[in-house]
Structure formats: C-alpha cells, structure tokens
Image (cartoon, rainbow, N blue to C red):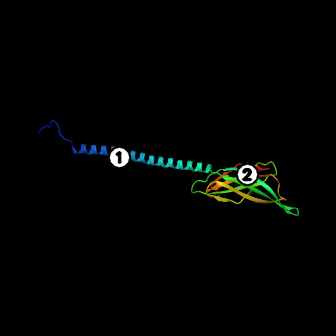
Amino acid sequence: MKIRKQEKGVGLLEVLMAVAVFAIGIGSVAHYYVGSMMLSLHSTEKNQALFLAREGVEAVRSIGCDEPEAFFEEVDLGEGEGVVILTFKGTLSEVPEGEAAEVFFQWGPVDGSDPLEEYLTRSTGSQTMSEGGEFSHEEEVDSVDFVGKYAYRAVAEMDGGATTIKGDIRIIP
C-alpha cells in the first residue's frame, strides 16, 4: 500500500461547499441591494408627493380674496317703497394654472352681539374664475327689512368645495 504525503488539487465536496458559501453571500448582497432600491424608490415617491402637496398648499394660499369691500345704496321706488342695493366687491389674487375657483360672498344682517360668523346666513350667486381679478355681486334688500349693518366676507372654493378660502369678516357700517 502506498501512503500519500500530500494531496494536490481540490475535491468535489470542497468545490460544492465553496460555491454554496459564495451563492449565499451573493444572494444576501442581492437581497439587500433590491431592498435598498425599493426603499430609495419609495423615498423618491414620498418626496415627490410631499413636493406636490406643498405646491398645492401654496397654490391654495394664493387664492385668498384680497381686500373685499361693500357698500349700500338706497333706491326710492316712490310711495314709501324702496330697496337697498348691497354691492360686494372682491379681488381674487391668483388661480393655479389649469384650475378654476368659484367665488361668492357670504353675508347677513347684524342685529346683536353674537360672533360675526353667526350672521353670515346668506350667500350670493357664485362666479367661476380661472384667473385672478376683480369680482362683484349685488343683492337687493327691501328697505323695510334693511337693518343698516351687515357682515360679509369673500369666499373662494376649488375642487368642488374641497378647498375653501374664506376672507376676513367685515362690516358694512
């Protein structure tokens, strides 16, 4: 019988073990790589959504109704009858491109000391505006019903009322 001093080369079992260890290592690296790519994609989508949300908020903020004003004028119809015409005016700052805003006024007579919000019981007809500019509306009040002091504010709505900007409540003296 011959005694071998040293074996040369690599056996099949050793090669299979090395391939298995290598495959497990490559599989782990590939798994973490795919995971990090998915996380990166999710992060990109999240940042994009955040950017669009901020852009939408800025667009909505720019819809504010600037410096609304209102005044009334008595019209004598003769024989003790008459009407009072209330004229409301507002300016829409800006409407985001491709969007439209419904603008109108909320108003009502003030006859007590309740919070002014409580008196805004009526609304004028709305106008659709696709760009900034002035808007106005007139309302007739029978002179018998005229109380002399009215609260009002300008309102702009977008997205079917999903986004509403309400101006400050003001008083017609």
What is the distance, in whole Å, between disc 2 and disc 1 at their CAs? 71 Å
Q: Answer yes or no: is residue 121 visible.
A: no
Give, as a three-letter code, the residue at label 1: Gly
Say which mark, if any, is on residue 27.
1
In this picture, residue 91 sits left or right of residue 6 = right
In the image, residue 66 lies at what x, y percent?
67, 49
In this picture, residue 57 sits left or right of residue 82 = left
The outermost residue toward the left is 1
- Pick the quarter of the image with the N terminus: top left
In this picture, residue 52 sits left or right of residue 156 = left
In the image, residue 97 lies at what x, y percent?
57, 55
Q: Nearer the viewer, mark 2 or mark 1?
A: 2
Figure quadrant of residue 127: bottom right
Q: Secondary structure at mark 2?
A: strand
The outermost residue toward the top is 5
Q: Disc count in the image?
A: 2
Q: Secondary structure at mark 1?
A: helix
In the image, residue 57 lies at what x, y percent?
59, 49
Q: Which residue shows up at 57% across the image and 50% down it?
A: 56
Q: Which residue shows up at 21% across the image and 43% down it?
A: 11
| 10 Å crowding of disc 2: few (<14), some (14-19), many (20+) | some
Q: Answer yes or no: is residue 15 visible.
A: yes
Q: Is residue 92 above or below residue 81?
A: above
